[in-house]
């Protein structure tokens, strides 16, 4: 009698990345010593690294059903090690720890897999990391994960097989949500705020305040009146909303610590091993989440101005705004419509600049206040 049940996929949690998954399935058959997964948060690099590690260690190349696959996917196989950074960056000490781990022999399998997240933050430790990746033992495979590739890491990247993970397409996020029972209208709303980040989408599903936060960002153009006091009050309201958005993530972190405490107690531990490192990671994730919330809000704000720009370009009766074409083409539009269109276009440019500056960790209050003051002056 044959078993007709579907074989579990090692890459089931990697959504909207068919090219990357196909590359990894092929690579698992004839692996090299180092891989670099490049993609923004929530694009699937972490679950892809887990599935790829299972395929590398599985005796059958990634069957998804054997004990090896199950333990790798559960995070309990001793020959798959995730090397998390211990500070704000992947420092020299972290890189040296990676050197030591790379030299050890596998416990069970023919090889070990070292997964290293946040490699884009390894600028200062790049020389140490490069030496390790260049000369690994034959039994070690590196899987490096990076949000992007700073120029300082180009040499490290050149020693790896690079696999790209673009932001998850909005349609793929919507489909993934609907498949999990989310109403289509809610799925569309969540996908708008997820920004291609599946991790955000997971938490936004149950976030009751999410729709109100989107509405707040959309209300900005109609609220601004050119006065600094109005801009300051709106900036404070937006930042308070960003703080409130942390609630679901903090609940998820608390649940993780509860599970770890229960597991530690079950084996006789008096506390959670590595608790400080875990809480430090949680704090970093919360800071990133808040920044991402502001970035997504700026995207919503930019779309609100683009909608206004489209209306202004269409003209008062649906006709196009004149753009200097000869007589017989578009009818001239009122000068006010032309001025409005230029103002909305300038607004989108200012918002785009502000979103890009978030990468430099600015004072977010000053950033938003200055942006809203300038937007208010545009009218």
Image (cartoon, rainbow, N blue to C red):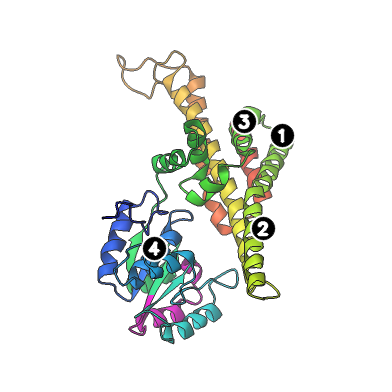
In the picture of the structure, the residue carrying the numbered disc 1 is: 230
Helix, strand or loop under label 4: helix
Helix, strand or loop under label 2: helix
The CA distance from mark 2 to mark 3 is: 33 Å
Query: In the rendered structure, which disc, 4 or 1, sits on the residue that comes first in sequence?
Result: 4
Q: Where residue 174 sits in the image (x, y, percent)?
A: 44, 39
Mark 4 or 3: the one toward you: 4
**Magenta residues (range):** 119-141
> Residue at 67% of width from left, 29% of height from top?
225
Q: Where residue 362 sits in the image (x, y, percent)?
A: 62, 55
Q: Where residue 272 sits in the image (x, y, percent)?
A: 66, 71
Q: Which image quarter: residue 140?
A: bottom left
In the picture of the structure, the residue carrying the numbered disc 3 is: 219
Q: Is residue 334 above or below residue 175?
A: above
The CA distance from mark 4 to mark 1 is: 50 Å
Mark 2 or 3: the one toward you: 2
**Is the Cβ of the residue at disc 2 closer than 8 Å to that at disc 1?**
no
Query: In the rendered structure, which disc, 2 or 1, sits on the residue that comes first in sequence?
Result: 1
Let me know if residue 187 is in the magenta part.
Answer: no
In the picture of the structure, the residue carrying the numbered disc 2 is: 254
In the picture of the structure, the residue carrying the numbered disc 4 is: 51
Mark 1 or 3: the one toward you: 3
Front residue of 197/66: it is 66
The CA distance from mark 1 to mark 3 is: 13 Å
Front residue of 35/270: it is 270
């Amino acid at each position: 009698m044959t078993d007709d049940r579907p074989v579990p996929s090692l890459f089931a949690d990697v959504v909207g990345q068919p090219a990357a998954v196909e590359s990894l399935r092929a690579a698992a058959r004839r692996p090299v010593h180092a891989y670099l997964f490049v993609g923004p948060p929530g694009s699937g690099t972490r679950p892809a690294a887990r599935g790829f590690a299972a395929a590398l260690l599985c005796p059958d190349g990634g069957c998804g059903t054997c004990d090896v696959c199950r333990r790798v996917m559960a995070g309990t196989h001793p020959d798959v090690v995730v090397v998390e950074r211990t500070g704000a960056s992947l420092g020299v000490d972290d890189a040296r720890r990676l050197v030591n781990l790379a030299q050890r022999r596998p416990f069970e399998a023919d090889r070990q897999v070292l997964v290293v997240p946040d490699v884009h933050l390894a600028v200062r430790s790049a020389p140490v990391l490069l030496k390790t990746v260049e000369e690994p033992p034959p039994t070690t495979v590196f899987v490096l994960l990076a949000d992007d590739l700073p120029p300082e890491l180009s040499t490290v990247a050149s020693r790896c097989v690079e696999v790209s993970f673009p932001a998850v397409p909005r349609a793929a996020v919507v489909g993934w949500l609907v498949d999990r029972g989310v109403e289509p209208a809610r799925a569309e709303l969540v996908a708008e705020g997820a920004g291609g980040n599946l991790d955000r989408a997971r938490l936004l599903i149950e976030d009751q305040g999410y729709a109100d936060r989107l509405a707040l960002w959309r209300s900005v153009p109609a609220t601004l009146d050119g006065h600094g006091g109005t801009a300051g009050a709106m900036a404070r309201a937006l930042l308070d909303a960003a703080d409130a958005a942390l609630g679901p993530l903090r609940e998820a972190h608390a649940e993780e610590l509860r599970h770890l405490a229960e597991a530690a107690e079950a084996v006789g531990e008096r506390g959670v091993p590595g608790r400080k490192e875990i809480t430090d990671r949680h704090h970093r994730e919360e800071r990133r989440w808040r920044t991402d919330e502001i970035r997504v809000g700026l995207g919503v704000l930019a779309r609100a101005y683009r909608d206004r720009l489209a209306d202004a370009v269409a003209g008062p009766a649906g006709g196009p705004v004149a753009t200097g074409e000869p007589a017989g083409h578009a009818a001239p539009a009122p000068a006010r419509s032309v001025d409005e269109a230029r103002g909305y276009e300038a607004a989108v440019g200012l918002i785009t600049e502000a979103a890009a500056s978030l990468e430099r960790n600015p004072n977010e209050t000053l950033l938003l206040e200055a942006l809203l003051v300038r937007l208010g002056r545009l009218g």
